Image: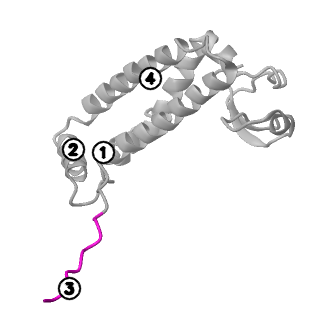
Amino acid sequence: MGSVHMLPPSRPQPADPQPTPSHPHAAAAAAASQAVEDMCRHGMADRLYRRLCDALDAHISCQLAALAAQTSLAPGTFLEAVAAMWAAHCKEIMLIRSIFLYLDRTHVIALPGLRSLVDTALVLLRQHLAARPEVCVCMCHPALPPPAPPCPDTWSVCHAPVLTTATTAAAAAAPTTCLIRRGCSSFC
């Protein structure tokens, strides 16, 4: 009689694999992108842009309302919540931009008064942050120097410490250079 060879157990597959061209999420995103292109070609670009901006405004308002409800947390925990919100916001905006790329590249560029979708999302986030001073106060760490007076719509270099979830007292004391847009609103 021959010996029986046992195969090693197979590894469990991840529950939600990353989207690939054969993955259903990729097909849905491609279909949505095609629908956006079709709408733009049929003269519905302006309406689509306005409705998307309204949806972004409502979504960002909800995100910051949820963040405002967490202002009573410890400063480190609150900054972790801010970092998580920012990471989710960036991921969502990149997904929206990828779906609405045709709108962004044709309609928005053709009309001089419109902002790109990414710029619109940043402006809306800035406006909603300015409207919630309790969030802005909690985002500013006591170790940070007081903010410089805003310069109208210019970019400037800030040498304030950058706070992250991994920030320690020693790291917070070390100056870090970052680029900050000044003008529309001051967050601290």
Q: Dividing the picture into quarters, in which one does residue 130 lie? A: top right
> In the image, what residue type sits under mark 2?
Ala
Q: Please identify the dominant SS of the magenta region.
A: loop
* Element class at badge 1: helix
Which residue sits furthest left? Answer: 1
At x 62%, y 24%, the residue is: 77
Measured from the top left, where is residue 115 in percent x and y?
46, 35
Task: Please tell me how crowded label 2 is: few (under 14), some (14-19), or many (20+) other residues with Cα within 10 Å.
Answer: some
Residue drawn 52% across and 25% down?
125
Q: Earlier in the sequence, mark 1 or mark 2?
A: 2
Q: Which mark is residue 3?
A: 3
Circle nearer the viewer, 4 or 3? 3
Magenta stretch: includes residue 124: no
Q: Is residue 67 left or right of residue 180?
A: left
Residue 102 percent location from the top left of the image: 30, 48
Q: Which mark is residue 99?
A: 1
Identify the amino acid type marked 4.
Ile
